Image (cartoon, rainbow, N blue to C red):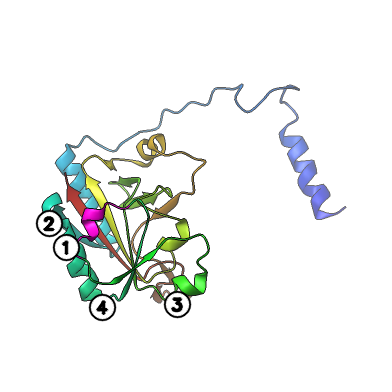
Amino acid sequence: MSSRDVVLARVRRALADVPRGEGPGDVPVPRDYLRTHGSRTAEERVALLAENLAEYRAVVHHCAEDDVHMLVMRLLNEHGTQHVLVPPGLDSWWMAAADPTRIHDRAASTARELDTVDSVVTGCAVAIAETGTIVLDGSPDQGRRRISLIPDHHICVVRVPDQVVDSVPQALERLDPTRPLTWISGPSATSDIELDRVEGVHGPRKLEVVLLSE
C-alpha cells in the first residue's frame, strides 16, 4: 500500500459518519471564543499596539497629519536612502518633503531591481493591537506584496485610531480574503538551531511604523 492509499483511507474513515451530500456550510460551527481580551478605549488600543510593535523590534513614531511629511523625510535621510519605492495610491503629502529618487511600483520590476531600492513607504489595511501586527492587502497605498518584502527598510503609516482594532477576529472582519494579505509582526527575522537571531531574511531588516493621528 502506498502512502497515498494510507492517507486516503484515513480520510474515508474520518468521513464515514458524514451524510452524503452534506457540505461544509451545512453544519453550524460555534464561535464562542473571546473576540477581545478585555475592554479598551481608543487611546489604550493605540498604546497597546505601540507597545507590542516595539516588543517585536519595530521602531514606533507618533505623528500628527501636519508633520508626517517631515517625519518621513527624516526617517529616509537617517537611513541614507537614495531610492525609495512609492505605491501609486500613497498620500502625496507623506512624501512632499522627501529628497530620494522615487521608484514607482511596476509589474515589470524584477526582484533584482527591487533589491537595489533602499526603502519603501506604504500605508496599511489594518493594525492589530493585541498581537502588534500590521496587515497589508495590496491596496493602492500599499502596492504589490513584493515591494514590502524585498527593500531593506519599510516605513508603514497607520492611521490611528481608525485603522487599529483589538484582535485578529476583528481584523479578519475588515479584510477581503481574496486579496493578497501580508501580515507583519516586526522586522523579518529567523533563528537557527542555536537560536541566533538573523534579521532581514525574508523581508525588511528595519521596520518603522508611523502612528498617524488624524
Where is mark 3, residue-wise?
A: 194
Circle 4 Cα neighbour tier, 10 Å, few/some/many (<14 / 14–19 / ≥20):
few
Where is mark 1, residue-wise?
A: 71
Front in this rendered view, residue 147 or 40: 147
Type of amino acid at the residue the image marks with label 1: Leu
Picture quadrant where residue 26 is located: top right
Picture quadrant where residue 51 is located: bottom left
Q: Position of residue 3 (x, y in %)?
A: 80, 54
Q: Label 1 to label 3, Cα distance in Å?
A: 38 Å
Asked if the residue at tag 2 contacts the one at tag 3, i.e. Cβ–Cβ closer than 8 Å, the answer is no
Between discs 4 and 3, the one toward the N terminus:
4
**On the rendered image, what quadrant is the C terminus found in?**
top left
In the image, which residues are magenta?
90-97
Which mark, residue 80? 4
Q: Label 4 to label 2, Cα distance in Å?
A: 20 Å
Image depth: mark 1 or mark 3 in front:
1
- Residue 172 sits above or below residue 30 on the image: below
Determine the secondary structure under disc 1: helix
Q: Residue at x 80, y 48 (%)?
A: 6
Q: Label 1 to label 4, Cα distance in Å?
A: 14 Å
Where is mark 2, residue-wise?
A: 67
Q: Label 4 to label 3, Cα distance in Å?
A: 33 Å
Type of amino acid at the residue the image marks with label 4: Gly
